Amino acid sequence: MRSLSDKKIEQLRSIAANPDFSSTKYRIVKELARGGMGTVYLAEDPELSRQIAIKVLSTPEANSEIGRRMVREAQIIARLEHSGIVPVHDVGVLPDGRVFYAMRLVRGERLDEYAARAGSVKDRLRKFQAACDAVAFAHAHGVIHRDLKPQNIMIGSFGEVLVLDWGVAKILPPHRVSEASEAETLMLPARKQGANDSQSISEDTTHGTIMGTPGYMSPEQARGEVEQLNQCSDVYSLGAILYFLLTNESPKPTKGHATPDRQFEPTPRPRELNAKISKAAEAICMKAMAPSNLDRYTSAAELSTDIARLVDAEPVSAYRENAFEKTGRWLGKNRYLILLVLAYLLMRFFFIFSARG
Amino acid sequence: MDRDTDIGGLQHRFPVTSHSAIVAARSDDQQVRQRAFSAIVASYWKPAYKYIRFKWQASNEDAKDLTQGFFAAAIEKNYFAGYDSAKASFQTFLRTCLDRFVANQKKAEQRKKRGGGADLFSLDFSSAEDELALYGPTSADSPADYFRKEWVRSLFTLAIGTLSQQYDDSGRSVYFKLFELYDLRDDEMEPKVSYASLANQFGLDTTSVTNYLAAARRDFRKVVLEKLHELTATEEEFRTEARALLGVEISEIPLR
């Protein structure tokens, strides 16, 4: 037999490593990204002549906990029809037993890459607000993400903001969904006969299970208090993302099982790292990241509203201004109008004096 | 479903029927030990030979003698019985043994004393030399990286040979022919073939070509995993190697 070249070995490795999609209508083009739970491939859907992304679980056990979780991730995303959440087209099991789901291919960059490359504070805040709106939509449908971080937010080629990776998302039992929500609570089919949805969820995440990313997970999440998690836990993570966008640094991990006392370092306030950050922006960030979930914004929608007000130079709920700050903000917001009026008055004076002269 | 011999998914799992040659090399049974050494030599002689040529800058004649001598000594002194999977992978262990052996040989200049030419194994060194000329180490390769790279080449070459043999034995040689023409074709030397042209050549329809190729790729993956299973000592090492080589997680089913 002839010798195998390095290139051929790579091709064979890819043949052996790539999932077998022969039982589906999709054709794998190449690997896009590899994570702890699975691998995302660029694939083609020949029937619709379009490119899509397919996430394939690494473990070939559809009935394992991780396999079930991935099916549920697909079901959760499929039901969250929002422009800020990537639509899922299909879910299934490959001949080798690995679960996959097909979704829209998002071309763009991650929020952390976007922040490193460019973006004025205002631009960053607008993107952040769009992410808050997508999360607020999920909250309104009784779903909490539980792993929000800059790496899980994509900025598309046209500036659209998409929240990704709902792999550890949780569906809250109806009584724990905000009463203010008018949307219908998302219900997934129970996995076992007679098991309701909240039971199914508790199988996935029992007390003491820590899911999330240090620095971005709430204190209750870091302590593994699964039953305490609600929308406010995601609000904390959004606050941590805002912290990153304002300071370019990730917050320090909160105290919990994942961060023992001896490793714990308190997170400095944003203005300690960058004095140019406004007090209002800092206040919003610190309110979202309050250690107690009772002190945080009650929902991502409320946080989004405060961000919108901050961008529009309106007063925000998280910060009480003094008269001097109020005047300064008003002047800042209306500076063009003030300049216009001053220019007009200057011209008037000039004409009056020149007429007298 | 026999969970003792299956890895993979629910429907077409990858049955691993091979046993660990590393474990068998410690057997009290002479025949079992012999078979295990043959499997180890088959997959490691080429990487060992090329590694000696690269790291120790040995001439091809010296490298041949040292390769033969190393495996002969490994069998005679039962080197592999001393392998402890908790300390390193078998691949690293074998490379360390090889280094030690070559260093000792060089020091004592025992090549002549050993008598040379008394070869224990029939090894095709000219093919190893051809490969060395074509795909020799690059400036970026460390000796350890190069050894691993050559071990992967050896593993895949053996897997292709086994796949061909299995298809011949089961009367499905057309599967391997298609795999050879489509997936093993040298992209730079041979013209690209399409599913349609293969269908035409073998008197099949395109769907059959698609299905046969998918089956051959699945079986190739299975054989690679079997070989890997054979050449690792523990489940943990097997899983680690499978992850490193193919990026796959093997399910938590007992394999041996």
Image (cartoon, coloured by chain):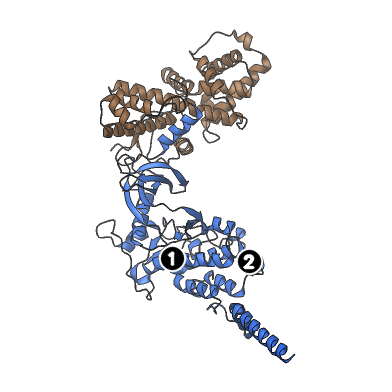
**Residue type indicated by callout 1:** Val
Chain of the residue that carries numbered disc 1 in the rendered image:
A
Name the residue at 62% across, 15% down. B59
Tell me the colour chain B is drawn in: brown
Q: Which mark is residue A135?
A: 1
Chain of the residue that carries numbered disc 2 in the rendered image:
A
Eyeballing the image, is A144 above or below B224? below
The disc, 2 or 1, on the residue closer to the chain's N-terminal end is 1
Q: Pick the residue in front: A229 or A130.
A: A130
Q: Position of residue A179 (x, y in %)?
A: 37, 75
Residue A342: quarter of image: bottom right
User: Which residue is identified by label 2?
Assistant: A268
Q: Residues within 10 Å of mark 2 (few under 14, many from 20)?
A: few
Tell me the colour chain A is drawn in: blue
Name the residue at 62% across, 85% down. A323
**Residue type indicated by callout 2:** Pro
